[in-house]
Amino acid sequence: MPRTGPRNLITDVAGLSVGNAGDARLKSGVTAVICDKPTAAGVQVLGGAPGTRETDLLEPHNMVEGVNAIVLSGGSAFGLDAASGVQASLREKGVGFDAFGHIVPIVPAAILFDLVNGGDKEWGRYSPYRELGYQAARAADAVFQLGSVGAGTGATTAGLKGGLGSASTVLESGITVGAIAAANGVGSVTVGAGRHFWAAPHEIGEEFGGLGFPHPLPAEAQDIRLKRRSLDPIENTTIAVIATDAVLSKAACKRLAIAAHDGFARAIWPTHTPFDGDLVFALATGTSGIEPDPAAAIELYAAAGATMSRAIARGVYSATATEGDTLPVWSARR
């Protein structure tokens, strides 16, 4: 039987901490995943409308071998400013790539669209995301909240509020896998109009309600339920990080990110559409000292998809209602 780490959070992967910052009036926020030391990383984009920063350097053939943090942010393209705030916090601590005596923190980032979720986006000349990024980095810890926090503050899905979710799995090999996701997809995380999560087969315990699959499946299970019928190509996106304490190369990290996208497909219907910017970053801290052999690698990549699906479901499951919401939370659905 699969089991979670002690926190059932991405921070069960040793070498990582997570900080969140949000603004209730703005209905948006930032999540920063901070690495204790430069960490091997990769990325895979499968949605048709991504918004990113510093993703090219993660390709296996490019020079930089380790990143210092990953940022997930609301705010559409404005949210890319959040990485500058995280970068500023790390630079104050002397953390970063030493470029001829100049410390340059390496902070890839991705954004989701939450501009039309009922929040006040009239912020004036400059967006607040740089400061939110700074606050998120300063708040980084091993324990953090889920739901309507950080990058999940204003997230939405088809028919329900989205949210920030996380989960972990400890494998028989001794390797730990963790995921964190800001669920904001165009599709639905529940089966039809009910309360049962698509990710149910991978649930451990009752981490998102313990409802399993409905039986029989409702007639509308295969209906395509969308956030809104009139779609714009930048109005959605689930962004996530998959992490492990295994020893992996940059190329293997990219493969891990690819495998974690299977978790999107198991948790959201439909996903990877032209209207989503679906993206997964991968991190390998190497803190376990285990370099997986082929059999352990198969187990690792399978767990990446399963753990990611659980993280997405937990984000929606944990969302809380706030004034001005345009969609209900899962806990209010009957």
Image (cartoon, rainbow, N blue to C red):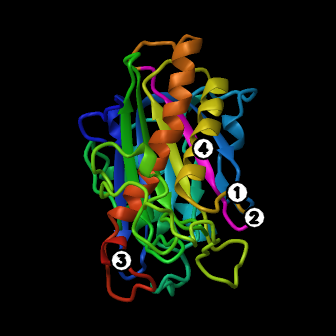
Residue occupying the point 51% across, 24% down = 299
Alpha carbon of mark 4 to alpha carbon of mark 1: how far? 13 Å
Near mark 4 (Cα within 10 A), the count class, few <14, some 14-19 or many ≥20, is some
Alpha carbon of mark 4 to alpha carbon of mark 3: how far? 27 Å
Q: Which residue is mark 4?
A: 262
Q: Which residue is mark 1?
A: 47
Near mark 1 (Cα within 10 A), the count class, few <14, some 14-19 or many ≥20, is some
- Of the pair 37 and 154, the residue shown nearer to us: 154
**Which of disc 1 and disc 2 is earlier in sequence?**
1
Q: Identity of the amino acid at label 1?
A: Gly
Q: Quadrant of residue 321?
A: bottom left
**Which of disc 1 and disc 4 is earlier in sequence?**
1
From the viewer's perspective, is residue 25 above or below residue 233?
Answer: below
Residue 278 inside the magenta-drawn segment: yes
Label 3 or label 2, whichever lies nearer to me, is: 3
Label 1 or label 3, whichever lies nearer to me, is: 3
Residue occupying the point 42% across, 13% down = 289
Please report the bounds of the magenta region as a residue range.
274-286
> Element type at marker 1?
loop
Q: Identity of the amino acid at label 3?
A: Arg
Q: Which residue is mark 3?
A: 333
Residue 327, percent across and down?
44, 82
Q: Identity of the amino acid at label 4?
A: Asp
**Which of disc 2 and disc 4 is earlier in sequence?**
4
From the viewer's perspective, is residue 112 above or below residue 91?
Answer: below
Alpha carbon of mark 3 to alpha carbon of mark 2: how far? 28 Å
**Which of disc 3 and disc 4 is earlier in sequence?**
4
Residue 328, percent across and down?
39, 81
Residue 106, percent across and down?
56, 40
Q: Which residue is mark 2?
A: 274
> Element type at marker 4?
helix
Label 4 or label 1, whichever lies nearer to me, is: 4
